[in-house]
Amino acid sequence: MRKIEEQMNTAIRYRRNWAGSNTMVRVYKEVVEVFLHGNHIASVDTATNDLTLFDGGWRSVTTKSRLNALLNEFVPSMRLNQKNWAWFLSDELDGSAVPFVSGMTVWEQSTE
C-alpha cells in the first residue's frame, strides 16, 4: 500500500479532514468522503460501517489502487480486480466476483 493511502486510511479511521497530493478526505457528521483529483470515489458511513465505492468517472489504476486500499482497511475480505478492462468486486471468503458498479455499498461481514 502506498504511503498516501496509509495516510488516507488513518484520516478516515480518526475522522480527520486531510489532503495529500491528489487525494482528500472530508468528514461530515457520520459520513467520511474520499476524493481523488476532486472526484468523489468513496464514502464511509461510520454509523452503519457501510463503505460505498465510486469510480469517480475514471476507471484508472490510481482510482482502483485507492479503492483497494479502502477495502483492505475496512473490508479486508474484498478486492477490486480487473480483467479485460472490466472491473470486478471479489469476495475472498466465498470466492465470488460481481461486476463493479459505481455506487456499490460493501461492509465487513461478521464471522461469528
Image (cartoon, rainbow, N blue to C red):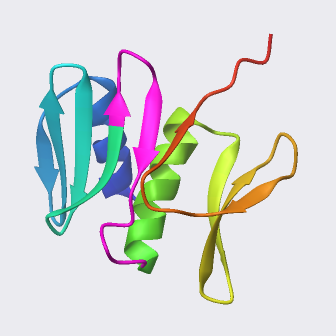
Residue at x 25%, y 28% (from the top left corner): 31
Q: Nearer the viewer, residue 42 or 10?
A: 42
Which residue in the rendered view is the most extreme toward the bottom?
84
Asked if the stretch drawn in magenta spans residue 48, the answer is yes
Q: Is residue 55 left or right of residue 105?
A: left
Residue occupying the point 52% across, 62% down: 101
Give the x, y percent position of residue 21.
15, 64
Side of 112 relative to 59 (left or right): right
Image quarter where the C terminus lies is: top right
Kindly indicate the quadrant of the structure image that contains residue 93: top right
The correct choice, above or below, for 43 with respect to 39 in the image is above
Residue at 14% of width from left, 64% of height from top?
38
The answer to whether residue 63 is above or below residue 48 is: below
Q: The magenta stretch spans which residues?
A: 44-59
- Residue 89: image x %, image y %? 65, 58
- Determine if the magenta segment contains residue 41: no
Quadrant of res 43: top left
